[in-house]
């Protein structure tokens, strides 16, 4: 082959490679953009949650500046109601949110302990809190993980919204005062390492059972349909993240999602106080009740596309499908 042929061949190969580079970048861009979106969307929800910090601090500034003589409880009640309207609107627009079983909540002045399955993000607990405030005029007190106290400015949110890390004594006092209190026994561990099979991951935690027995209140099991399809945690190298979590005790597993799936919170029939039960026996009964709610209402394993399609189903159609599943 002469020099001219070699030069021509080399030029052709180089031109081909140069022409292929933009195509490669375009292909990578088209592939990475959806991945970037599904990992960024959860942070939009986190930012919505964290937006309560500057909002409540602004309210506190205005209270101290202009309404110092006003009733503090009434002031914060009005501030909470505005938050409830925002969260309720968000729940309807993004997830067609519904609640089944609100009638199982005791009337004002009656205490009850709500025990719920913890999704990757507990967005359903915020939605339910807003729903009960607007429809039942009741605020659900919440036991949150201790790592929340490390967030700058969160202490005011905890005080106003009654979010606490919750000792047994403080939880019992809340329930004896006739308030509603919610606890997710699985906590951050269940949030991080649960999956679309919806297995209850409570280990040997019986603290909530001791609280209910000492306060002599009923337990209301709670489960939100498709909560694992709304947000998911990555499944690779899970053993490594389990070890990291056991050391750090903070969320370490990346979350992705924010999918516009149908969310429907189901409040099961109350489990009445029974002094003959031990904390272990009560824990097992409640875990079985949560598992039963999953069996009755949740498609297992969960499917994101079908969960989005659930938004087009009516409650009547869902009830019919569940009746057919029960017969089968």
Image (cartoon, rainbow, N blue to C red):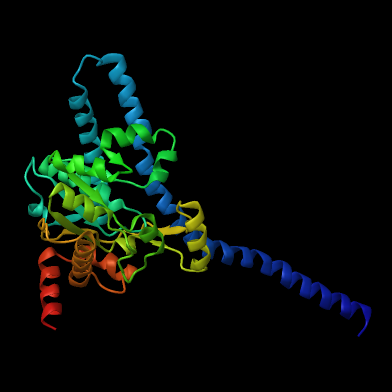
Where residue 169 sits, quadrant-wise, is top left
**Left or right: 45, with 12 as reference point:** left
Residue 159 on image: x %, y %: 29, 33
Q: Is residue 152 above or below residue 236?
A: above
Quadrant of res 83: top left
* Farthest residue, direction right: 2
Quarter of the figure with the C terminus? bottom left
Residue 82 point in image, percent of width and height: 23, 34
Is residue 161 in view from this perspective?
A: yes
Q: Nearer the viewer, residue 276 or 260?
A: 276
Residue 256 pos. (x, y %): 43, 59
Q: Residue at x 33, y 43 (%)?
A: 165
Question: Is 286 left, or right, of 40 in this rendering?
Answer: left
Asked if residue 114 is positioned above or below residue 154 in the image, the reply reads below
How many numbered callouts?
Answer: 0
- Res 265 visible: no
248 horizontally vs 227: left or right: right
Q: Nearer the viewer, residue 243 or 28?
A: 243
Q: Please give the name of the residue rendered at 53% of the width and 62% of the height, measured from the top-left corner.
A: 32
| On screen, residue 284 above or below 126 | below
């Amino acid at each position: 082959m002469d020099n001219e042929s070699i030069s021509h061949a080399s030029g052709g190969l180089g031109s081909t490679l140069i022409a292929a580079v933009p195509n490669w970048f375009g292909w990578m861009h088209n592939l990475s953009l959806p991945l970037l979106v599904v990992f960024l969307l959860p942070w939009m929800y986190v930012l919505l949650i964290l937006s309560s910090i500057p909002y409540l601090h602004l309210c506190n500034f205005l209270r101290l500046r202009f309404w110092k003589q006003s009733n503090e409880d009434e002031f914060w009640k009005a501030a909470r109601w505005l938050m409830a309207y925002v969260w309720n609107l968000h729940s309807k627009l993004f997830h067609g949110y519904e609640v089944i079983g609100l009638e199982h909540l005791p009337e004002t002045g009656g205490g009850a302990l709500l025990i719920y399955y913890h999704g990757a993000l507990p967005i359903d607990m915020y939605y339910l809190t807003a729903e009960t405030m607007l429809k039942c005029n009741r605020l659900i007190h919440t036991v949150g993980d201790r790592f929340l106290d490390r967030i700058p400015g969160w202490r005011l949110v905890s005080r106003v919204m009654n979010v606490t890390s919750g000792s047994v004594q403080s939880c019992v006092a809340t329930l004896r005062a006739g308030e509603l209190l919610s606890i997710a026994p699985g906590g951050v561990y269940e949030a991080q390492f649960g999956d679309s099979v919806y297995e209850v991951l409570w280990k040997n935690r019986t603290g909530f059972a001791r609280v209910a027995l000492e306060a002599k209140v009923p337990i209301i099991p709670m489960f939100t349909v498709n909560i694992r399809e709304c947000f998911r945690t990555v499944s690779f190298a899970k053993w490594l993240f389990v070890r990291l979590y056991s050391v750090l005790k903070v969320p370490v597993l990346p979350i992705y999602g924010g999918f516009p799936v149908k969310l429907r919170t189901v409040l099961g029939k109350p489990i009445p106080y029974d002094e003959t039960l031990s904390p272990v026996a009560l824990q097992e009964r409640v875990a079985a009740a949560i598992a039963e709610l999953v069996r009755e209402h949740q498609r297992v394993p969960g499917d994101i596309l079908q969960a989005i399609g659930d938004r087009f189903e009516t409650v009547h159609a869902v009830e019919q499908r569940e009746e057919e599943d029960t017969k089968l």
